[in-house]
Amino acid sequence: MENSLGFAHFLQHSDGVARFVLALMLVASVGTWYLIVTKGVRLYRLRQRSEQFLKAFWDAPNLETVASQIRETGATEPFSHLLHHGFTAIEQQNRPTNAARLVDTGAPDDLLTRALKRAIDEDRHQLEFGQAFLATVASAAPFIGLFGTVWGIYHALVAIGLSGQSTLDKVAGPVGEALIMTGIGLAVAIPAAIAYNTFARANRNLMAQLNAFAYDVFAFLSTGVKTSPMRADARATSEKVIALARAQRQGSLAGQTSN
């Protein structure tokens, strides 16, 4: 009587090691596709919001308009987040204080540079979330599947040797079943490798645009080399924005106190 061979037969006759390898591959596959879907959707939405913000930024008559937009919508993408850090640095620079703090040390331009760099580092950290997992799965999954194959072939050959039947039809079936593990390893590794390269390239392009935008923000808020379309001084404009935001915050605090 011939035994039916296949993946179900392999699972039925596999031991704890083989099932552990299969469970590990299942976890890696689920994690990979979860990151592919979530990071893909997030990156698509991030690009749309970034394009909308950059268009509104370059079409704005002055920085007050941009600051009002950030207060209304929030810093929901890297470019507005970078500009928000720039405004915060100028606010720290103009804040009257008697106590010397390490965060306020250095020249004003150095303070602004550190703030912009800190914003870029935070955005890079968020964009690279899950990249290490994808790289690990892409590099390790084929070898884990190969280990499962070797383990399955070993047990298949032992069982064949004990049965005393070493004909080709008796060997090919169990060995073919063991090769399923290698196929599973490749099926898990290939999407992870493609996703890693795709996201790495997209993040690299976005970070290049963000670094270029950081130079423009630095020029607007610090040196005044570039001016807005209305030729207003960048530092004076940013100070007006900070003063307006501080007055609104004090007004809201006063309203809460009176209530």
Image: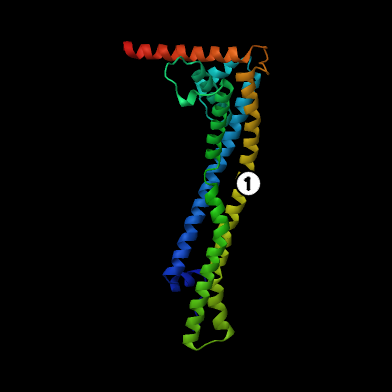
* Above-or-below relation of 251 to 150: above
> How many numbered dots are placed on residues in this image?
1
Q: Position of residue 235 (x, y in %)?
A: 60, 15
Provide the secondary structure element on which disc 1 rests: helix
In the displayed structure, does residue 63 sit left or right of residue 20?
right
- Closer-to-camera residue (251/168): 251
Q: Residue at x 68, y 12 (%)?
A: 231
Q: Residue at x 47, y 16 (%)?
A: 95
- Judging by the rendered image, the residue that carries numbered circle 1 is 198
Please indicate, yes or no, whether residue 77 appears anywhere in the rendered image. Answer: no
Q: Residue at x 47, y 64 (%)?
A: 21
Categorize mark 1 by other alpha carbons within 10 Å: few (<14), some (14-19), many (20+).
some
- Closer-to-camera residue (24/93): 93
Quadrant the C terminus occupies = top left
Please indicate, yes or no, whether residue 57 appears anywhere in the rendered image. Answer: yes
Q: Residue furthest left?
A: 259
